[in-house]
Image (cartoon, rainbow, N blue to C red):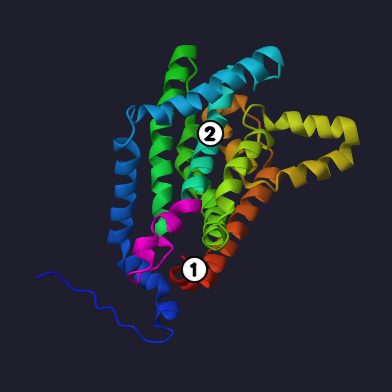
Amino acid sequence: MGATHKLILEPGRASKNYWRDLFHYRELFLILAWRDVIVRYKQTAAGFAWAVLQPLMSIIIMTVIFGEVAGLPSEGNVPYAILVCAAMLPWQFFANALSLASQSVVNNSNLISKIYFPRMIVPASSIVVSLVDFLVACSILAVLMFWYHFWPTWRLIALPALVLLAIAAALGPGLIVTALTVRYRDFRMLIPFVIQFGLYVCPVAYKTSVIHDKLVIKLGQDLGEKCFLLYSLNPMVGVIDGFRWAILGGSSTFYWPGFLISLALTLVLLYVGILYFRKTERAFADII
């Protein structure tokens, strides 16, 4: 007979053994993640094609508007479509993860109100769906590289670590927004607007150095550098720069101060997100 896990309910036990319970409920995490993946793709006629079509159309539009019409520069000899794709992949992952996580607890209200388990499993499992979308969408990058005869360098080995950074960048805000959505349902309407606005604030359609150079020209060297560091407080700036550095190889420049600032804020938001979620999750069953 297999080993059994005893669930003992007593005051304060859930808080003391939260991370242990999170591990013990890992099978529930896998079940919820697999269910979300199946539901997402089985209930659509195009299936996995949607994970490709959405970023592909955005890449085409941005390449035409920003690359051809506006004439913004690429990185060295990198085709503009690949420049955009290298940024669109992590951005699309972040946007989907934030959107799905924000509604995950509300959509699982029946489960939340009936049994005990660490509620963090719900938004964390929803991010797996976005990760599957990301892996499927990577086929766009492979096709573009083959089409333009542009091959990656040794830097590509850093991509798994950058994917983990992207997950952390999505999970921190995702936990905060999830907890807020349970109490204030208006956030379900706000998130799509934030995502749409963020697509143009983040350096997806253009390289980060364009922002840096414009700020330096307009404000001078010192003030421009300081304003660019403020711009780098956006966690996705560091994630996107990291992806481009890994995918584009030697053609991509890398601004370490901005990346480190984005990395630091990502870790801070993850820490704050975990704290805030744990503080508010006790009341989820009552509010929902």
Residue 29 in which image quadrant = bottom left
Which residue is identified by label 2?
246
Which residue is identified by label 1?
287
User: Position of 206 compared to 226: left or right?
Assistant: left
Residue 123 in sight: no
At label 2, the amino acid type is Ala
Residue under the point 88% across and 42% down: 223
Residue 95 sits above or below residue 154 on the image: below
Give the tally of numbered discs: 2
Residue 94 sits above or below residue 150 on the image: below
Residue 275 in which image quadrant = bottom right
Of residues 192 and 32, the one drawn nearer to the viewer in this rendering:
192
Q: Looking at the image, do the residues carrying marks 2 and 1 touch, with CB atoms under 8 Å apart?
A: no
State which mark lies toward you, 2 or 1. Answer: 1
Question: What secondary structure is marked by label 2?
Answer: helix
At label 1, the amino acid type is Ile
Q: Is the residue marked by circle 1 packed among few (<14), some (14-19), or many (20+) residues within 10 Å?
A: few
Residue under the point 40% across and 26% down: 139
Q: Magenta includes 108?
A: yes
Q: Quadrant of the N terminus?
A: bottom left
Label 2 vs 1, first from the N-terminus: 2
Of residues 35 and 62, the one drawn nearer to the viewer in this rendering:
35
- Give the extent of the magenta segment: 102-121
Question: What secondary structure is marked by label 1?
Answer: helix
Residue 179 is situated, as x and y percent measured from the top left of the image, at 53, 62
Residue under the point 37% across and 26% down: 49
Residue 280 is situated, as x and y percent measured from the top left of the image, at 53, 70
Residue 52 is situated, as x and y percent measured from the top left of the image, at 42, 27
